[in-house]
Image (tube, grey):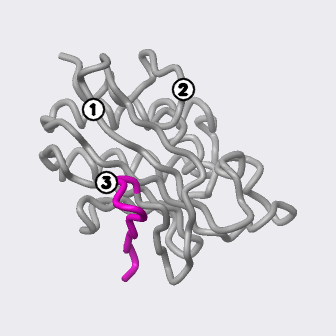
Amino acid sequence: PACAAEVADGSEWPAHQWLMGRSLSRVAQRDRRLAWWFRVYQAGLYLPEGLSAQHTAGQAAGPDAPWPDAPRRLWVRLHTDVAPSRLQASLRAALHTALQSLGERSADAPALRTLAQEAQQQMPVLKAGDVLTIDWVPADGLVVRLNERLWLRAAVSSLVFGVLIQPWLDEGGGTRSPAVWLVSR
């Protein structure tokens, strides 16, 4: 299957994921809480063998980069329900950050704007236990699935993937954290 996950040793973190026929290994993970007792989500970054977490952004783009065509995945398991209005706000913040980081004149900017419009038209309700995958696949660009069903797709560079996933994995959280975006009132 295009989105298969394996869980090793009974843990709740998949050790490996399969994407487009390639095995991906977990190279980074985050268990995000807003307080020690309020778990919001888990996120794991999966890359092909030989790539590290630094290969998610600029280092993995361009013809001289290692594995420039390597698929990448961010896997997120939610531990709380998320209202569509909160998901909209979260997505707007993430896309705004991506546009700022890449620049309004970036070749990816038009596709990001289209992605934002499409997302607003088909905003799902997220429930605790749902799994969101954000993939970058060379032939398709960015592919977002909710519980293995296609939600969004945009033909963008791997740079966009790197920018969009960074807040999910950042150590500090703060106002950039999706945990804050998803559950704040």
As helix, strand or loop, the secondary structure at mark 3 comes to strand
Q: Marks 3 and 2, how far apart in space? A: 20 Å
As helix, strand or loop, the secondary structure at mark 2 comes to loop
Q: In the rendered view, does 107 fall on the left or right side of 131?
A: right
Determine crowd level at label 3: few under 14, some 14-19, many 20+ residues with C-alpha closer than 10 A: many
Q: What residue span does the magenta drawing correspond to?
A: 1-13
Identified at 21% across, 52% down, the residue is 130
Disc 1 target residue: 40
Q: Marks 1 and 2, how far apart in space? A: 15 Å
Q: Quadrant of residue 34?
A: top left
Q: Which mark is residue 132?
A: 3
Task: Name, please, the residue furthest toward the right.
Answer: 64
Identified at 40% across, 54% down, the residue is 13
Identified at 18% across, 53% down, the residue is 122
- Quick one: 70 or 8, which is closer to the camera? 8
Identified at 63% across, 40% down, the residue is 105
Up-down relation of residue 166 to residue 22 (above or below): above
Residue 25 at what x, y percent from top left? Answer: 57, 63
Amino acid type of disc 3?
Leu
Task: Name, please, the residue furthest toward the front.
Answer: 9
Residue 78 at what x, y percent from top left? Answer: 25, 43
Asked if the residue at tag 3 contacts the one at tag 1, i.e. Cβ–Cβ closer than 8 Å, the answer is: no
- Quick one: 156 or 127, which is closer to the camera? 127
Residue 7 at what x, y percent from top left? Answer: 38, 64
Q: Which mark is residue 172?
A: none
Instruction: Tell me the quarter of the image containing the C terminus.
Output: top left
Upstream in the sequence, badge 3 or badge 2?
3
Amino acid type of disc 1?
Val
Q: In the rendered view, does 64 fall on the left or right side of 171?
A: right
Depth check, mark 3 against mark 2: the one in front is 2
Disc 2 target residue: 171
Up-down relation of residue 134 to residue 5 (above or below): above
